[in-house]
Amino acid sequence: MLSYLMRFWYWLRGMQTEPEPIAVPDFDFRPTTAFRAFVGEDACFVISNPVDLMMQHQGLMAEMLVVDVHTANDTCTMWMRYSSEELAMRGTAKCTLFVGFSDQGFDGVCGQVRNRKKM
C-alpha cells in the first residue's frame, strides 16, 4: 500500500524516476523463561500491531508493543514498553510489562522484540 502511494505521489509530481522499494521490517516477540512460566508454558505470543511498530521504528509513535497471548483457556492482550532507539540500533530491544493480567503483576524483562530482517 505504501509503495502504491509513493508511486502515485511521484506520478502527481511528474517525476520520471520511481523511488526504491521500502524494506518492511519483520518483527517478532521472544518471551523470557520467567515470563513464559508466568503466563503458561503453552502460551503462543503474536504481535498484534505491526503497522504501529513500523511507525515507532521511524520515531512517529510512542514505544508500545501490543502482544496477544493465546493459551488453551484464554486469549489476552498485553501492552509492553520497549526502546525503539535500541531496536533501531541493534535490531532487538527488551520489553517490560505495562498492562497485562488485571489480577497479577510481573516485574522484570518479559522478553525481546526483534526485527528479523536486521538480525
Image (spheres, helix red, strand yellow):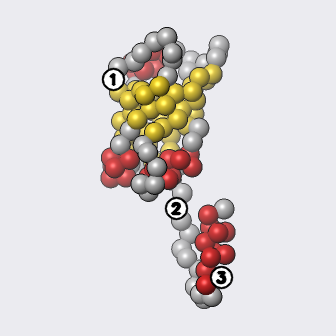
Mark 3 to mark 2 CA distance (whole Å): 23 Å
Q: Which mark is residue 108?
A: 1
Q: Depth check: give the residue in front, 37 or 107.
A: 107
Find the residue positioned furthest to the top. 103
Q: Residue at x 41, y 54 (%)?
A: 59
N-term mark: 2 or 1 = 2
Q: Which mark is residue 23?
A: 2
- Name the residue type under label 3: Leu
Q: Tell me, yes or no, if residue 18 can be seen here.
A: yes
Can you give x and y, in whole percent of width and height, for residue 19 in the image?
55, 76
Q: Are marks 1 and 3 in contact (CB under 8 Å)?
A: no
Quadrant of the rendered structure where residue 110 is?
Answer: top left
Can you give x and y, in whole percent of width and height, for residue 104 in the image?
46, 12
- Name the residue type under label 2: Ala
Q: Which mark is residue 12?
A: 3
Can you give x and y, in whole percent of width and height, for residue 31 in the image?
44, 28
Residue 6 horizontal side relative to residue 65, left or right: right
Q: Tell me, yes or no, if residue 117 can be seen here.
A: no
Badge nearest the viewer, 3 or 2: 3
Can you give x and y, in whole percent of width and height, for residue 62 in the image?
43, 45
- Name the residue type under label 1: Gly
